Image (spheres, rainbow, N blue to C red):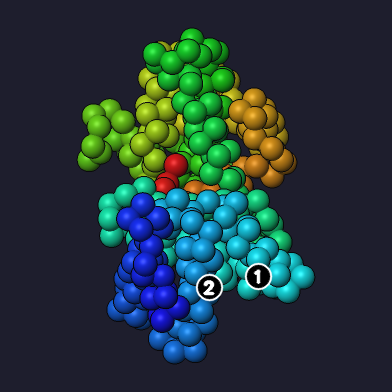
């Protein structure tokens, strides 16, 4: 990348040209080894994109590790913005930036820089630029909302400020936690039984670490991992359920007598939880939670095959839609 070598006279406190060069070379080698980038024409396009960003950052005094979404917005503006750069070009550029930065973070053992992801979340015209008009992409929770929701859901656990709330409130939050933390559908949540929460073999004694999901007309029987925070909340719900003396095998019953939770009642309960947590656009929120689980697993490096198995997905088109949304790996909530 000759363009980058033009900036070899920067001082020790200035942005490092070597950081940009090394990040690019390391990522490119990784992609070629994995067989994900083989066409020289694609390499040339990506190299031009990265070289232009590198030159701009060095000229503006922006260090690679300090790159922000505002910096990326300014860079795109310097290239002509929406007047000269197509939304798909912006999507491709931001996806490249996020992948290079994620690879750099893995190599250095540091926290990933999600500036490109943040800009994609802020600009839907970029995020969905690669989607066909007749093939809508899944809606999901932005990272900030997902973390806010996890904090809210976990607040009913023992020792938290909201402990002692009604058993229905704990049930509702635990049910929402399984949709976000295990990717199960609303119908699957209602069908779960107590024995489907797997405790044996987990890292923490007495805490469920995966779910057994029964097969139905839309998905085969399967097992799916449970996020640790969701496992803690489910363990609390199981203890509370036992304490309340609720009979039957339904994991989430409607009443203390063990009555089955109805679709309408569960939908309203989920909506109330999301509203109370401060989540925007709560309509259709149940499947947004499932989509968020899928995307966060993919972004953490899990294979599409594994994620499809956990979701009970057999249609390749479903995973293809997730892949088109996917900018690059980020932490799993």
Residue position marked by numbered label 1 in the rendering: 79
Q: Where is residue 171 shown, x and y percent of the image? A: 52, 25
Residue at image coords 41%, 70%: 7
Secondary structure beneath label 2: helix
Q: Quadrant of the N terminus?
A: bottom left
**Label drawn at residue 300:** none
Q: Which residue is mark 2?
A: 52
Left or right: residue 64 compared with residue 49:
left
Q: How far apart are the two marked residues, 2 and 1, measured between alpha carbons? A: 9 Å
**Which residue ends up furthest to the bottom in the rendered image?**
40
Residue in the picture at 29% in, 35% down: 199
Secondary structure under tag 1 reads loop
In the depicted view, which residue is nearer to us: 85 or 185? 85
Q: Residues within 10 Å of mark 1 (few under 14, many from 20)?
A: few
When asked about the image quadrant of residue 31, the answer is bottom left
Residue 77 x, y percent position in the rendering: 68, 63
Task: Judge whether 78 appears above or below 121 on screen.
Answer: below
> Which residue is at the front of the view, 32 or 231?
32
How many labels sit on residues? Answer: 2
């Amino acid at each position: 990348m000759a363009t980058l070598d033009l900036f070899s006279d920067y001082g020790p406190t200035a942005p490092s040209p070597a950081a940009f060069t090394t990040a690019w070379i390391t990522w490119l080698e990784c992609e070629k080894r994995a067989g994900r980038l083989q066409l020289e024409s694609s390499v040339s396009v990506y190299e031009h994109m990265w070289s232009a960003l590198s030159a701009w950052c060095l000229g503006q005094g922006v260090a690679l590790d300090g790159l922000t979404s505002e910096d990326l917005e300014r860079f795109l503006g310097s290239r002509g913005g929406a007047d000269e750069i197509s939304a798909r070009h912006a999507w491709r550029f931001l996806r490249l930036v996020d992948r290079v930065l994620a690879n750099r973070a893995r190599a250095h053992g540091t926290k990933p820089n999600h500036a490109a992801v943040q800009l994609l979340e802020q600009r839907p015209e970029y995020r969905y630029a690669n989607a066909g008009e007749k093939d809508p992409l899944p809606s999901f929770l932005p990272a900030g909302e997902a973390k806010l929701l996890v904090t809210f859901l976990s607040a009913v656990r023992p020792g938290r400020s909201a402990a002692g709330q009604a058993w229905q409130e704990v049930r509702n939050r635990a049910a929402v936690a399984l949709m976000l933390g295990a990717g199960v559908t609303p119908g699957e949540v209602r069908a779960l039984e107590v024995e489907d929460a797997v405790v044996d073999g987990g890292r923490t004694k007495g805490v469920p670490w995966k779910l057994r999901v029964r097969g139905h007309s839309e998905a085969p029987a399967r097992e799916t991992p449970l996020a640790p925070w969701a496992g803690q909340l489910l363990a609390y719900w199981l203890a509370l359920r036992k304490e309340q003396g609720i009979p039957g095998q339904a994991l989430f019953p409607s009443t203390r007598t063990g009555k089955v939770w109805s679709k309408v009642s569960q939908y309203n309960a989920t909506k109330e939880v999301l509203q109370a947590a401060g989540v925007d656009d709560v309509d259709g929120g149940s499947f947004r939670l499932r989509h968020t689980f899928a995307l966060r697993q993919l972004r953490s490096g899990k294979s599409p095959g594994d994620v499809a198995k956990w979701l009970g997905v057999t249609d390749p088109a479903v995973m293809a839609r997730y892949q088109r949304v996917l900018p690059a790996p980020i932490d799993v909530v």
